Image (cartoon, helix red, strand yellow):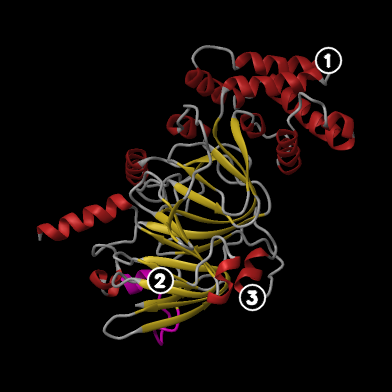
């Protein structure tokens, strides 16, 4: 079935005032709206529309007939979101499967309320995630080389004097101690320790970033990275004196153009900084935070689960499937994400990455959101189904025959990853 779904955007402080309301075609609330959840996560399930006379969530629909509406007779393992990032998110990691299961069990056994501020593990699932930019998106994602972090610290020290220069030089020296992964872990322990050198270094970074904004000659200084200066300035303005600002120097800073993507494996330290994006993840809400937030921060637990290995490249490429259709297939079983870009037939020659029609397999449930124009979704089965989906509208597509997309617009389609899909077929053949 082609089932319209909708949800109310979540209002977090880091959201934008009007991006999601513009997408949905609804009046702005005057409050920052951050995330639109399109899935069956119990924390904020989407509502089913135009299919029932009574209020029904997507969870209710799946539970009413799991074989028809669920994945393999059970929960849907992915969650699709649209993000509107107006201010930096917290510095955070998500647990892997074993960590999530153990952490959830421990908090359940300890009687920690599901709604408690100090609750880290709301469910026993891991949370890898893939983000695709709709606008320019900036992000801190994964550990870069320590030599690059030292180089930036030394450059900042070279344009300061006195205690500021000494503090930044001291921080750079700390990143020279021992093997790289261990040095990163020691750095995380130290930066949240309350050492006065941390506060001095944070003051120094804020001073350099502010001075560069006021002095074009300093900002164009050959040894200073303008992107790094820009994110330091943003973090210092939104979270002054937060130790997470120092940690940001250890991470890749990336600017994504529309259509670019990053994949965040479980245990990978990251923070989104700004922009509008589509995101798909394992259906979990487990977050361990270490700064750049007013929410609960659990530095010891984050330091325990974080992966301190270097990430060579945060960007994640797509693969072409057919004219007008690409897919991002990260190495996780829970999800993959497709993007269909459509044009009217007479405009096909003018559109390099668009096609008049796209066919998408629906062996397993799909969640579709239209981010541009209007898309006609059709399924030819015993009874043909058709849905006209405008920008901002979403569909839940139950498993069955392929769907055909036509029209003039863009749609993102999430479904299970290849590993789960292949296992499903294997089980089916063995029955």
The percent position of residue 384, horizontal first and vertical second, equals 34, 84
Q: Main secondary structure of the magenta part?
A: loop
Which mark is on residue 26?
Answer: 3
Q: Nearer the viewer, residue 292 or 353?
A: 353
Q: Nearer the viewer, residue 12 or 128?
A: 128
Q: CA distance from mark 2 to mark 1?
A: 60 Å
Residue 275 appears left or right of 107: right
Q: What residue do we see at 17% from left, 54% from top?
A: 426
The quarter of the picture where the C terminus appears is bottom left
Q: Residue lying furthest left in this view?
A: 431
Membership of 123 in magenta stretch: no
Q: CA distance from mark 2 to mark 3?
A: 21 Å
Residue 197 appears left or right of 189: right
Which mark is on residue 228?
Answer: none
Q: Which residue is mark 2?
A: 396
- At mark 2, the secondary structure is strand
The percent position of residue 161, horizontal first and vertical second, equals 84, 17
The disc, 2 or 1, on the residue closer to the chain's N-terminal end is 1
The percent position of residue 96, horizontal first and vertical second, equals 38, 40
Q: Which of label 2 and label 1 is nearer to you? A: 2
């Amino acid at each position: 079935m082609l089932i319209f779904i909708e949800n109310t955007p979540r209002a977090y402080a880091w959201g934008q005032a009007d991006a999601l309301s513009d997408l949905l075609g609804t009046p702005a609330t005057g409050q920052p709206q951050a995330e639109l959840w399109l899935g069956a996560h119990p924390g904020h399930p989407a509502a089913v529309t135009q299919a029932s006379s009574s209020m029904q969530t997507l969870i209710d629909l799946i539970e009413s007939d799991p074989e028809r509406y669920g994945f393999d007779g059970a929960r849907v393992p992915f969650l699709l979101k649209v993000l509107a990032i107006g201010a930096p998110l917290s510095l955070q990691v998500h647990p892997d499967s074993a960590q999530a299961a153990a952490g959830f069990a421990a908090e359940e056994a300890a009687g920690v309320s599901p709604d408690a501020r100090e609750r880290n593990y709301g469910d026993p699932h891991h949370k890898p995630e893939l983000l695709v930019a709709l606008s320019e998106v900036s992000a801190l994602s994964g550990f870069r080389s320590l030599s690059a972090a030292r180089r930036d610290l030394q450059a900042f020290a070279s344009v300061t004097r006195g205690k500021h220069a000494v503090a930044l030089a001291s921080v750079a020296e700390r990143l020279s101690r021992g093997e790289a992964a261990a040095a990163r872990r020691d750095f995380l322990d130290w930066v949240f320790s309350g050492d006065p050198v941390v506060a001095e270094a944070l003051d120094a970074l804020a001073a350099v970033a502010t001075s560069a904004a006021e002095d074009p000659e300093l900002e164009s200084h050959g040894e200073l990275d303008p992107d790094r200066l820009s994110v330091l300035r943003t973090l210092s303005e939104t979270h002054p004196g937060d130790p997470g600002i120092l940690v940001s120097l250890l991470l890749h800073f990336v600017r994504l153009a529309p259509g670019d993507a990053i994949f965040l494996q479980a245990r990978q330290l990251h923070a989104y900084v700004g922009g509008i994006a589509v995101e798909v993840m394992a259906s979990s809400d487990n977050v361990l935070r270490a700064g750049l937030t007013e929410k609960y921060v659990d530095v010891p637990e984050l330091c325990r689960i974080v992966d301190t290995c270097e990430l060579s490249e945060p960007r994640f490429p797509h693969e072409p499937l057919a004219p007008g259709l690409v897919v991002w297939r990260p190495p996780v079983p829970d999800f993959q994400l497709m993007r269909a870009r459509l044009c009217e037939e007479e405009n096909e020659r003018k559109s390099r990455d668009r096609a008049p029609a796209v066919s998408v397999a629906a062996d397993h449930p799909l969640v579709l959101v239209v981010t541009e124009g209007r898309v006609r979704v059709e399924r030819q089965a015993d009874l043909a189904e058709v849905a006209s989906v405008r920008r901002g509208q979403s569909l839940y597509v139950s498993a069955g025959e392929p769907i055909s997309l036509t029209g003039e617009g863009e749609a993102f389609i999430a479904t299970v990853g290849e590993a789960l899909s292949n296992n499903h077929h294997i089980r089916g053949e063995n029955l």
